[in-house]
Image (cartoon, coloured by chain):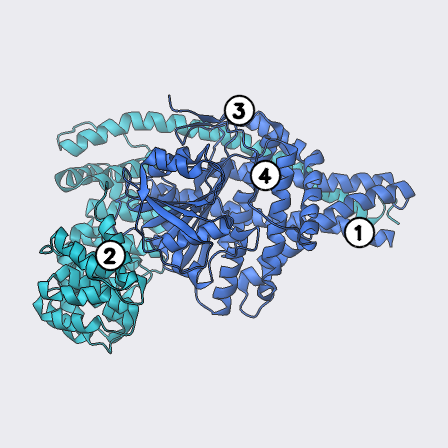
Amino acid sequence: MPDFLTSFFLLYFIALNGVYLALNALSVTAVFRNNQQRDLDDLPQVQSVLDPPISLLIPAYNEAATIAATVRSALQLTYSQFEIIVINDGSRDDTLQTLVREFSLLPFPEAYRIQLKTQVVRGIYRSTTYPQLRVVDKENGGKADSLNAGINAARYPLFCGVDADSILQRNCLELVSRPFTRNPQMIASGGTIRAANGCEVREGHLTRVGLPRNPLALIQVIEYLRAFLFGRLGWSSLNAMLIISGAFGLFKKDAVIEVGGYRTDTIGEDMELIVRLHHTFRVKRKPYRIEFVPDPVCWTEVPEDFRTLRNQRVRWQRGLSESLNSHWGLMFSRHGGWPGWFAFPFMVLFEWLGPFFEVLGYIWFIYALALGHVSTAAFFVFLFVAIGMGVLLSVSGLLLEEIGFHTYPRLRQFGLLTLFVLVENLGYRQLQAWWRLTGVVQWAIKKESQWGTMKRKGNWQKEKD
Amino acid sequence: MLNTFSDPFLDFAFRTGVLASLLTVVLVVSIMILRLHRRWVERHSRIFMGVWRPALMLGMMSDAVSALPPLRRRDHWLFLKLWNHFQESVRGQSSLRLGRLAYRLNCDLIAHGLLRHGNRTERLFAILTLGHMRDRSAWDLLLHEVDKSNRSTSLYAARALVQISTQDAVESVVPRLIQRDDWELTQVATLLQNFRPALGAVLLQLLPTLPEERVLRALRLADAFRLHVDAEVLLPWLDPGQPIERLGACLRLAAGAQVLNPIRALTRHPDWRVRVQAARALGRLCQPEDAPLLTSLLSDPQWWVRYRAAQSLIGLPFASREQLQALIDSQSDRYAREIFMQVAAESRPGD
């Protein structure tokens, strides 16, 4: 038995990292292809009135401090035709009053159309200075409910869900909508999320890219690189991406309405929607594509203290658990394709159950070492493999970033990132496995879900001079 | 029991760890080399731009640029990118002058080489270059590219053919525009907008002769090109029994008094998508006698029909604000009143 367990955990760690490395290989090809495409995209483009118009949906709950800057930043996006819909989800602070004051909102007699059921809409406002800006004021119902209300109010065929505390790159709509102009089968596309901590933001726009001083935030910079650059890029090339971040994703409205909109009884509404889109379109055998576009970047503040980070990760893992458990029918289904036969089982085995095996693996080796079931050598080999492969994965994320983006050009930045690739694997990764395990347990005991509140510092945001 | 390194399994795990560590070192070194290389490329590119950007600016304004800097082999790619960048921003004489400058630098030969042996992006830039240079000798090569499955290279090759000789290209390009569903209409219309008259003429000529399954694509193409399609051509397709999507496409193109009656009939079509387009078409064709019909559409069960009908009504040039207000007041249907008030508010930005 001890031999079996030891071998199992070792094999599991090797398999987990091996699959990630395979994804990484796919991503390298995708990054090269993206670099080539960028040469073409860099040519002067004619902005066409035929570009699909976009409704930008910004759900906000108690965002009085940041909402004005977010909307101002959104108003400056470069795209031929778009509208902004802020959904005030029954905020208990001055979110609505701030919007009314900053953007000269007046009640708007909208014939609100209910395509997706939501909490009661109390009123709709329109800006008298920016006619493309509307605010939907509704009873509290959560982020998913707010997005559904936004979809109901949206006029345009594509909608882009954005977090109220995110900073969007100015041409991000142009970039994230390109898959839709290239391929009529496109139903969703998502961009890259990066950590804004350490960057400089003025009037809602990123003016300088930097790295955070806070070690926890710095580790998350590496995590985000890894998650987006080879996680999503790899799956995207197989049309098997099972998540588009709620912080920045573009969707075909009809497709989302067809599958019933965002589910309001889940924490991970962003992932659940994507899995449901895959599931429904596969079952109906309708051709579709869901794509990741690495170029458009959405900057978001990441937690800088353990407590907030823990809560965030627990919430994410619960969201993952809910999303996967609602769609078992996709796994190994007859028409499941790459999502059903590879991405879904991968998610179940390595992302959902992964924390169990990781935590149990560490516990087992310590226990077995103490009882003499494994030698000291075997114990250190286990650590060596687990940490070594983790470091390799993170470094390969850095390599992809270097090939494709070169976001952190200074030598000091590279040195810092390389150092933290090591640090990340010595304690943080193990801690994260524990938090994720907590998330699965909380999901299993069905602890009540609510809007994710995050302690924000926002010291990277500079006020208007 | 996994107690020693002599255990093959443990040995395998150890070797995996060693391999991972070695690979990590290799990757870190690769990143450093990449950064050094990038720095060199950026410096070289700055020097190149410093020389060639002014040269191209001059070449764009006059043919009399006598001494051009030598174009080194390693700069071919940079030059093609910069030259195409200029070409995509200019038209007319400037574009022709840039073309002549490119011939002086043998860019046609470079582009031919890239088209035969380059990767996807190099082939794309070669196609762009040959099109902007109006290189006749590339005709057959480009025609061959048009029929390839790659949607970008094939579409750009079609544009290159039209650039080289619009007259000769339209006969072969327009049927492909109708045939190739993978060529996104938005992109087609954007790329070929300068050649709309010539392409449109052939498209309109082909329209009545097309097989059933191609009519919808052709109608959408005509719409994307903002063409005027004769009412006689559209009339048979405005029959309520026609497929929904075709009816929608026809209604978007409908113009002239001849089509008014069929459009009025289509406001009662069972499919709301047709009624939406009919409401829009009636607004566009704006006849005073259609106001009651549009008003009745304000009570349609579908939101979009009500919305478009309200927009059409408010857009009627002969209806005054007072008349519209009276119309709102006369509505007993709550939905009709609400949608009308919304659209009225939308049409007054700044209120």
**Mark 1 belongs to which amino acid?**
Ser
Q: Nearer the viewer, mark 3 or mark 2?
A: 2
Per the rendering, the colour in which chain A appears is: blue
Q: Nearer the viewer, mark 4 or mark 1?
A: 4
Q: Quadrant of the N terminus of chain A?
A: bottom right
Question: Between marks 1 and 3, how big is the CA–CA gap?
Answer: 41 Å
Q: Please state the horizontal and vertical placement of residue B42, each as a whole percent of the image.
A: 40, 28
* Chain ID, mark 2: B
**Mark 3 belongs to which amino acid?**
Leu
Question: Between marks 4 and 1, how big is the CA–CA gap?
Answer: 28 Å
**Mark 4 belongs to which amino acid?**
Glu
Nearer the observer, B86 or A447: A447
The residue depicted at 29 percent of the width and 61 percent of the height is B334
Write down which chain is painted cyan.
B
Q: Is residue B128 left or right of residue A299?
A: left
- Disc number placed over residue A7 in the picture, else none: 1
Q: Which residue is mark 3?
A: A411
Q: Which residue is mark 2?
A: B340
Q: Please state the horizontal and vertical placement of residue A58, each as a whole percent of the image.
A: 42, 44
Question: Between marks 4 and 2, how big is the CA–CA gap?
Answer: 51 Å
Q: Please state the horizontal and vertical placement of residue B295, each as a whole percent of the image.
A: 19, 64
Question: Mark 1 or mark 3, which has the lower sequence index?
Answer: 1
Q: Residues within 10 Å of mark 2 (few under 14, many from 20)?
A: many
Q: Residues within 10 Å of mark 4 (few under 14, many from 20)?
A: some
* Chain ID, mark 4: A
Question: Between marks 1 and 2, how big is the CA–CA gap?
Answer: 71 Å
Q: Is residue A6 left or right of residue A84?
A: right
